[in-house]
Image (tube, rainbow, N blue to C red):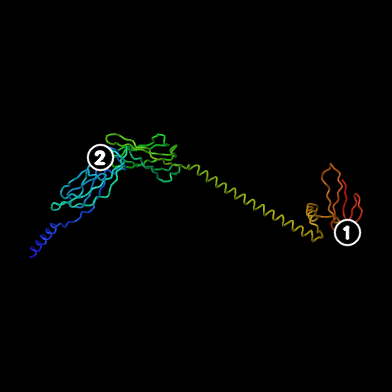
Amino acid sequence: MFTLSVVLGMVHVYALVGEGITYELAKPTLYITPPYGVFLTGEGLYLTCRCRCPVTRVRYQRNHQLITEVDPHKGECVTSADSTAAKGYGSVYTCQCLHAVNGQWICSEWSDPVQMVIRDSLLEPTIYIDPGSGAASNGDKVTIFCKGDIRSRGGTFHLYKDGKGNRVQSRNVTGDERIVSFTINTRSKGSGVNYSCRYQTEVVGHWRDSAVSKDVMITVNDADNGVLLNVGLGCAVVVIALLFVVIICLLIRKRRQIRRQSNERSRASAGGVTNPEVADNTYDTANLPSHPDSNGMYSEVPESDHQEITYATLNMGAVNRKEATLVTAKETSLYAEVKKK
């Protein structure tokens, strides 16, 4: 009974297909190998289309024109087709998958387009630096990376300094390598300059040179100069601190002098001297002998013997009492003692 049901189901499906009921194929995926950034005229390439099984035939188009059809082996879902880069600025490629069912073709959508760039010269290399700022201390190592479209037969990368064709390093690579690194020792003389790179590779049996990349710059900071700079800054800080201390000390001393003068004026005023100028004068006589004579006067004879001087020292106490007397040389008065030398 079960066997009969299966047979009837198969017959029913066959009948539906015969009446024209079909199914859709999934949208394929197309990619180009090798994955160069640009192709040169005459270079060979491969178009690879990936379909969902089952598939009977694959079509390839270039700029919406059919260029080839490939019938894969039974069970295969990926096919490739050869092509050649034609003259022009580029081509757009697409592919389509087909499957035959009862003599009818079931077609998928066309794949997303893939752009191929065609030029007469190689792609300019890309250069970058680590660290990205390019700044390094004397003795540090800086790495420069250079990337280019190396063909299947390999090639060579060259590093240049100052953009003057002065080659400083070279690296040979295989066809699977697209990027190389160059190490710069900043302790070397003249290492802090601009660097650029280019590459050579074989294209259609001939070696071709790329254009020179943009420049990257390495800046080397001299470690010795940095130490001297730090020492200089430290000394400057110490000098400024000392100057600050000296200024503070001078201000304190000045303030004490002003306070002492104020105290002296206060004492002079308490003794009967009300005029500030007179008080200052009495303060200035502080260097006179500390023991006055019987009349309360101070006297001092100049040490110089080259000149005869008559002088007198006022007795401020007597002046305040308004007492007066006439004095002559070698006489003593309440107001002053007159001497002559």
Amino acid at pointer 1:
Lys
Q: Secondary structure at mark 2?
A: strand
Residue farthest along the front direction in this orientation: 19
Along the horizontal axis of the image, is 152 left or right of 298? left
* Quarter in which the N terminus is drawn: bottom left
Q: What residue is pinned by disc 2?
A: 84
Q: What residue is pinned by disc 1?
A: 322
Amino acid at pointer 2:
Thr
C-alpha span from label 2 to label 1: 133 Å
In the image, residue 38 lies at what x, y percent? 31, 41
Contact, mark 2 vs mark 1 (Cβ under 8 Å): no
16 shown above or below 127 = below
In depth, the one of 303 and 183 nearer the eye is: 183
Badge number at residue 314: none
The quarter holding residue 278 reads bottom right
Q: Secondary structure at mark 1?
A: loop
The quarter holding residue 335 reads bottom right
Residue farthest along the bottom direction in this orientation: 1
